[in-house]
Structure formats: structure tokens, C-alpha cells
Image (cartoon, rainbow, N blue to C red):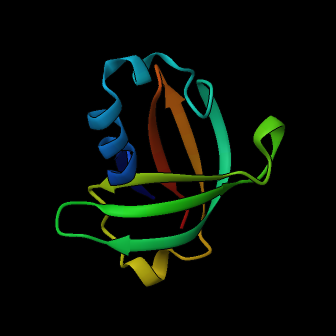
Amino acid sequence: CALADATATPDRAEILRRVGPKFCECDPVLEDGSYDAVVVDATAGEEAMALDLIILGGAHKGEVVSIRATAMDIDEVDLLGLPGTLVVENGVPLFRVER
């Protein structure tokens, strides 16, 4: 399986710059835990790939989560529709694609 370190999307990073550190004090979108997800959009960039994932179960079922992933060794088109596991630990997401 492919492994990706995920960070905030550029849009969120821009918001953090404009609003400042107080914005960081709010609760993360997803609590720490493991979430089954499917890739519904992938866009390759120069340094990272932007991924949109839909959460498949639990309290966040149906929510779309956007992450930026590095170290992806798969084409963006090939990622579409692939299942995986999103693990959030200390507010930091890590997405593992199942293939």
C-alpha cells in the first residue's frame, strides 16, 4: 500500500496566516482515531498531492476531508475511487491507500 504524510490544505494554511494562532485553538475537523475513507478527488502538485476523501462510517460518515499528501507513489487518476484508512494522531492525519 502507499503511505502519505498529510498536512493542511493550502486554503487552510492561508486562513491560518490571516487569522493567526487563535484559529489553531479550535477543535480539529476529525478527532484522533482511524477512519475508513475513499479517494473522491486527487490533484497532483509540484510538492504534494491534494486529496479529497469521503469518510465511510462513524460520526463523520459522508463528510469530505481535504488533505495534502506527500510521498505518494501513484498517479492521481489511479487514486480515484481507491479505499484507504485515514489515521489522525495528535491532530495530524496520515492516509494509507489500499491497493
Quadrant of the rendered image containing residue 87: top right
Q: Residue at x 46, y 19 (%)?
A: 90
Q: Nearest the camera: 38 or 66? A: 66
Q: Nearest the camera: 9 or 75? A: 9
Is 27 situated above or below 56? Answer: above
Q: Residue at x 49, y 24 (%)?
A: 89
Q: Quadrant of the N terminus?
A: bottom left
Q: Residue at x 47, y 81 (%)?
A: 78
Is 79 situated above or below 20? Answer: below
Whether residue 3 is visible to the viewer of this picture, yes or no, is: no
**Which residue occupies the extreme bottom position in the image?**
77
**Which residue occupies the extreme left position in the image?**
46
Residue 32, position as x, y percentages in the image? 58, 24
Q: Nearest the camera: 20 or 26? A: 20
Quadrant of the rendered image containing residue 16: top left
Q: Residue at x 59, y 58 (%)?
A: 53
In this picture, residue 96 sits left or right of residue 33: left
Quadrant of the rendered image containing residue 22: top left
Residue 94, position as x, y percentages in the image? 44, 41
Whether residue 93 is visible to the viewer of this picture, yes or no, is: yes
Residue 64, position as x, y percentages in the image? 65, 55
Total labels drawn: 0
Residue 3, position as x, y percentages in the image? 38, 51
Is 88 situated above or below 96? Answer: above
